[in-house]
Image (spheres, rainbow, N blue to C red):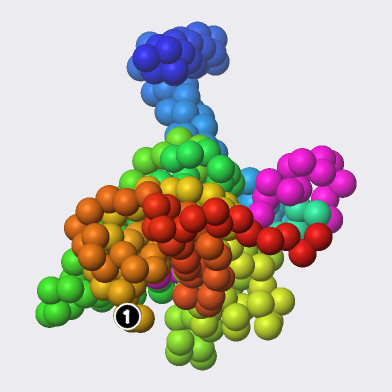
Amino acid sequence: MGTFFLRFLFLILCSSLGYYIARDLFPTKTQALWGVGIGGGAALLSILFEKLSQKYPLKIILGSIIGMAFGLWVANLFTSKFISSFLGTLKIGSITLVMIYLILGYLGFRIGTIKASEISLNSLPFFTKKEKESSNFKILDTSVIIDGRIADICETGFIEGSFVIPRFVLQELQHIADSSDPIKRNRGRRGLEILNKIQKQVDIDVVISDQDFPKIKEVDAKLIELAKRMNAKVVTNDFNLNKVAELQGVSVLNINQLASALKPVVLPGEPMTVKILKEGKEHGQGVAYLDDGTMVVVDDAKKYMGKSIDIIVTSVLQTTAGRMIFGKIKSEAGNFFPISNT
């Protein structure tokens, strides 16, 4: 509410200033009223630019300004050398001049916006080290968007900065959401919902990138190429994409690795309470699961199927598929104490 009130006052102030300036410059009341519209329009453009500056990262804003300034400079150079000498001060000449400025200014703005990712803030001396570090982008791939955990991580505040969603990833999500297979269709729609959820979060900037690589067919290869050009990190939970990106020197943030690192540490000899859910592979074994999905294999626990029991951890095994915990029933473990090698 406070921001809206300030913007409203700014609009009134600019409109009033426009009226008084126009009244001093032009004799008629009608011309003075034009000043209200011009002042109000300038205020609305300023407010729009403020809102856009909150949504888009610094690179995009800087590239847009540089591109538009260059386009206007080219327009001024072109009109001063060629158009004025042919059209003079005729009315059609004035209209032509305005159109040239609008067209070249817009083209410069768009080119600057599209090519902004190639601007290196590290080469600009007036940015501090903190600002340079915060300019890094994180590119989301299709799998991590559909997975959904990235939105929950963003809510915790552990990830800051700008997320880049390539247009070709959006197209892949849309294609999945339109699939005739109900499972794929639900996955695609979930991905679109997750993106919408991330966009509504205040601390995260979401940028839609129009950069594409028509000569590259695979989406994963396009992601890696885009990350190279933007000097960005790829956020994924795809094991194969993770390995290929690392081989090509692209930094990767793997959600699965993060989840594995956040699992609580369990040491041999520690007690815990688990619920036996199914039979294990070996004779008499029972299998339970922790809240984070970690499998717990308990010797001689098949007879306690469906019940909660106290166990003692005997060993912990880390595998490529995750972590496994082995244990014995506490009442049957006796005086079990792990022997330290140190």
If the image is split into quadrants, where does the N terminus sit?
top left
Horizontal side, residue 279 vs residue 108: left or right: left
The part of the image, by quadrant, that contains residue 70 is bottom right
* Residue 273 visible in the snapshot: yes
Residue 142 appearing in the image? no
Q: Is residue 25 above or below residue 64?
A: above
Badge 1 is on which residue?
Answer: 283
Residue 243 against residue 286 in the figure, above or below: below
Query: Is 122 situated left or right of 41 in this image?
Result: right
- The residue positioned 66% from the left and 54% from the top of the image is 136
Which residue is at a point 46% across and 58% down the rendered structure image? 333
Identified at 48% across, 48% down, the residue is 271
With respect to residue 21, does 102 lie above or below? Answer: below
Q: Residue at x 66, y 77 (%)?
A: 246
Query: Does 290 appear in magenta?
Result: no
Q: What stretch of residues is rendered in magenta?
A: 123-143
